[in-house]
Amino acid sequence: MRFKPGSKVLASMEPLALTDIIINMFIFFFITFSFLATFEKTREGQVNVNLPKATSATPPVEKKRLNVSLKKDGGLFLGDTPATIEELEARFKVEKAQGADVILVIRADGDVTHSRVVQVMDLARLEGLNRLAIATQNR
C-alpha cells in the first residue's frame, strides 16, 4: 500500500467544542434549579414536620410570629435553627421584655407526644406569651 506524500488527516475540534458548551449549560441549569428548590420562599424558616390534620384549621393572623417546631425524633427548633428548652426560655423572655404582640405557633409532628407540646406551651405561658397557636393541615 502506497500513501501519497503530503496527505494529512485533518481533525476537527468543532464537535468537541459543542459538547463542552452543552455540558456547561447542563451544569449551569442544574446548579440554578438546585438553588431555586433549596431557597424556596414558601419553605423559608420552616422545619419539615408532618402536621396533624384538622377540619377547622385556619392560618394565624399575621402579626409577629414565633415558630417553634417539634420533630418526632426529639428535635426542637426555634424558627429553622435547632434550640434547647433553655434557649426557648431566653427567647420568650426577650420577646416579652420588648412588649411585642407575639403569636407563638407550635408546629409539632403528628407523632410527637402530647407532653412535649404542653411543655413548650407551659414555658411560653410562664414567660408571659399568652397568644398560642398549633399549626395543622387542612383535611
Image: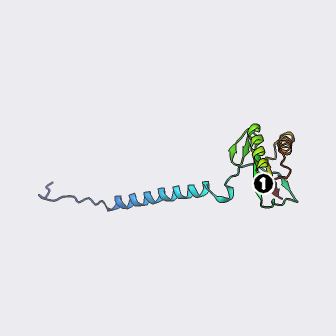
- Residue type (three-letter) at the residue carrying disc 1: Ala
- Quarter of the image that includes the C terminus: bottom right
Q: Is residue 88 above or below residue 52?
A: above
Tell me the colour scheme of the image.
rainbow
- Residue positioned 68% across, 59% down in the render: 42
Q: Pinpoint residue 30: horizontal percent, then vertical percent.
A: 52, 56
| Rendered image quadrant of residue 41 | bottom right
- Residue positioned 43% across, 57% down in the render: 24
Q: Residue extending furthest right?
A: 56
Q: Pinpoint residue 61: horizontal percent, then vertical percent.
A: 81, 61
| Rendered image quadrant of residue 3 | bottom left
Q: How many numbered circles does the render carry? A: 1
Q: Regarding mark 1 in the picture, which secondary structure is present there?
A: loop
Q: Pinpoint residue 26: horizontal percent, then vertical percent.
A: 48, 58
In this view, the residue in front, 9 or 129, is: 129
Q: Is residue 23 above or below residue 69?
A: below
The residue that label 1 is drawn on is 100
Is residue 121 left or right of 12 when viewed as pictured?
A: right
The crowding category of the residue bearing disc 1, from other C-alpha atoms within 10 Å (few below 14, some 14 to 19, many at least 20), is few
Q: Residue extending furthest left?
A: 5
Is residue 2 left or right of 114 when viewed as pictured?
A: left
Q: Pinpoint residue 135: horizontal percent, then vertical percent.
A: 81, 53
- Residue positioned 35% across, 60% down in the render: 17
Is residue 47 left or right of 113 when viewed as pictured?
A: left
- Quarter of the image that includes the N terminus: bottom left
